[in-house]
Image (cartoon, grey):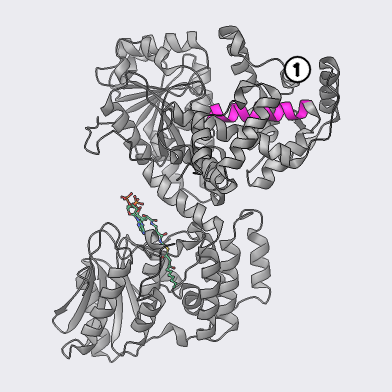
Amino acid sequence: MSDLVSYRLEGDIGVISVNYPPVNALGQGVREGLVACLRQGLDDDQAKALVVIGEGRTFPAGADIREFGKPPQGPALPDVVAEYEASDKLVVAAIHGTALGGGLEVALGCDYRVAVDSAKVGLPEVKLGILPGAGGTQRLPRLIGAQKALEVIVAGNPVKAKDALELGIVDELIGGDLLEGALAFARKLAAGNAPLRRIRDLQAKKEDPDLFSNFEKSIARKQRGFKAPFHCIKAVQAAVELPFDEGMKRERELFAELLVSPESRAQRHVFFAEREVAKVPGLPKDTPKRDINQVAVIGAGTMGGGIAMNFANAGIPVKILEVKEDALEKGIAVIRKNYENTAKKGRITAQQVEDRMALIQPTLSYDDLSDVDLVIEAVFENMDVKKAVFSELDRVCKPGAILATNTSTLDVNRIAEFTQRPEDVMGMHFFSPANVMKLLENVRGEKTADDVVATVMDLSRRIGKVGVLVGVCHGFVGNRMLHKRQAEAIQLVNEGASPAQVDKVLFDLGFPMGPFAMSDLAGMDVGYRIREELRKEDPDNAPPRNWTDELVEQGRLGQKTQAGVFDYKEGDRTPVPSSEVDALIAKFREEQGIQAREVSDQEILERCMYVMVNEGAKILEEGIAARPLDVDVIWIYGYGFPVYRGGVLFWADSVGVKTIYDKVSQFHKETGNDVWKPAALLENLANEGKGFYG
Ligand code: HSC
């Protein structure tokens, strides 16, 4: 018998206890143990009722995701849940930590559910591209109604215990020790001869006749490209329209379709990749970390302010430095406004606004930074300015303070050399808006000390970011690939495509917006400044001038000036093709002697995407990113690459590395452009018939 689940008698109540760290996932051994212990409890004449509980940090947090895709081994989870539901003794689920997915489904097979205040319950399967497949879509609507069940299942977000009580998912909150409370609850039920409560016997209610079609419409935009949310709706509909056993059959069919779908494979890949990036190859888990209790940010602009908010949100005091008083005041006012807007949406309380603002301390003097543990510089992208800032930081900061730069393109090794302590310097590249975007590209310099890397990676998680470690090169991983795509997008327009056509192809692939709408959003002047800097510093490698430079020089900076590559109406972010820009493009083609031609959508897709795959391969070869999954996580969390395609390199595997290599070689032959020179890694993988992931 499995030793992952044990049975014991506590007085007159049988306790079934799951012990499978870290999250008591419902792997084969746990499922087997749950059934065996239930049978033991049913056979135990002294047990008047049963309690199921998880040891360690949580009630089971779901099916064991690592088993998906492998040959199934019984007992199947739906059968386990059915056996609990069929029990003729009362069963109480005692919940702490996170009762998620299959974990909650087991609890729904029990007659009653109690939870500690800090517990959360939920059915997050949709985030893995599947649906609750052990009766969750059939039992939850029967318990709480179809509308609420749809909200829980389709969003997949965890529900706090207090809200779960209100919804009726949980029957009682336990204030003190969970086991004691659950035992007392079970005894009270047994003493009162409380009836069994089998959810399968309830009727699911549909509150509104158009519930399902309306719900589908309401998520259509946000869930574009995902399959699982729409299957979840179909399954809940079955709960309302079919008898329980038929509904279960329908759930099983829909689950099976999703499990083998490319979307789910990709989403499960992202789940593990997101956790894997925290484990840096070659950096032992026990590498010491420096204490970070007080942080400072240099620069109170959009970026600096956003960065500071992350620390205040996590309860870490942060100083924010500007050289001019009015810029400082303006920056602080913007932060307050951002918090107040969040409060207006009901996401934080007015008190939280004040608490967070109290953690942000404005200053005009570098001397105030003598006690901070970490400084993040977020000033203008110019080496001379960085030099001035880092020399000053080197002068005032205490020994052991980490000095970080938020540069998105400049050489972190050169910046480190502006100090006497390059081992304490690294990059922390936040993405705009810095208080929202989850990605943090942490850049290790040549001389960065291991404990600095370990500290910054750990801190990323503390402030709710996904930190990915990268090496030094122009643009690091994300922007280096992005710049290649942008250049290709511009080149496609030069040859005859329209900006709107290019954008549509990438939008249809699943990006939130195309490359030109994106540069309008970011501000066309950002890229322009980087190009100008390159033209000064490294003219041989700088991109040639093109029509986008002219747009900037004419004041078309993007959304902020209501005109960039596209036009924008006041208060509307929808890009509208511009005849003025079309004329500029035509003029550029004429000056260059280019005869515009028809460009196919397929060519746009191949050139914009394959150039990134090739660059990604070069990045891996050079060791700038350690693994394909690091590149993929960067593209998902930094640039909105569709999760259901798993990341740029995961997507490349789905196309076929050989197919991509052949095209890249062809483009190289046709253009002679270095960017298309196939990466050796790409070539090797293609020759071996392998993908980035084997
Ligand atoms: C499911 O339940 C499907 C069901 O409907 C059943 C269908 C049956 C159908 C049968 C048909 C015949 N599995 O995140 P952390 C690992 S789908 C395996 O860093 P935290 C994780 O990889 C599942 N491993 O911790 C990591 O490993 P590492 C629905 C899992 O405290 C370690 O645990 N449930 C795992 O920040 C720690 O994780 C979910 O989707 C799992 N289910 O967060 C919940 N869950 O150390 C997914 C975690 O080697 N999990 N691991 O890197 C979570 O959301 C978070 O892990 C928690 C903990 C909130 C549980």
Residue at position x 42%, y 72% in the image: 169
- The number of numbered badges drawn on the structure is 1
**Residue 681 at what x, y percent from top left?**
49, 32
Seen as rendered, the residue at the extreme front is 687
How dense is the environment of label 1, judged by Cα within 10 Å: few (below 14), some, or many (20 and up)? Answer: some
Residue type, mark 1 in image? Glu
Image quadrant where one finds the N terminus: bottom left
Front-most of residues 3 and 519: 3
Which quadrant of the view contains residue 75?
A: bottom left
The residue at which mark 1 appears reads as 550
Front-most of residues 236 and 489: 489
Which SS class for mark 1?
A: helix
Which quadrant of the view contains residue 574?
A: top right
Magenta span: predominant SS is helix
**Residue 416 at what x, y percent from top left?**
37, 14
In this view of the protein, can residue 514 be seen by the observer? no
Residue at position x 60%, y 82% in the image: 241
* In this picture, residue 395 sits left or right of residue 464: left
**Residue 250 at what x, y percent from top left?**
55, 77
**Residue 470 at what x, y percent from top left?**
42, 29
* In this picture, residue 541 sits left or right of residue 114: right
Image quadrant where one finds the C terminus: top left
Eyeballing the image, is 349 above or below 500? below
Stretch of the chain drawn in magenta: 478-494
The answer to whether residue 23 is magenta is no
Residue at position x 81%, y 26% in the image: 581
Front-most of residues 635 and 430: 635
Eyeballing the image, is 498 above or below 136? above
Respond yes or no on whether mark 1 lies under 8 Å from ligand 1.
no
Eyeballing the image, is 181 above or below 97? below
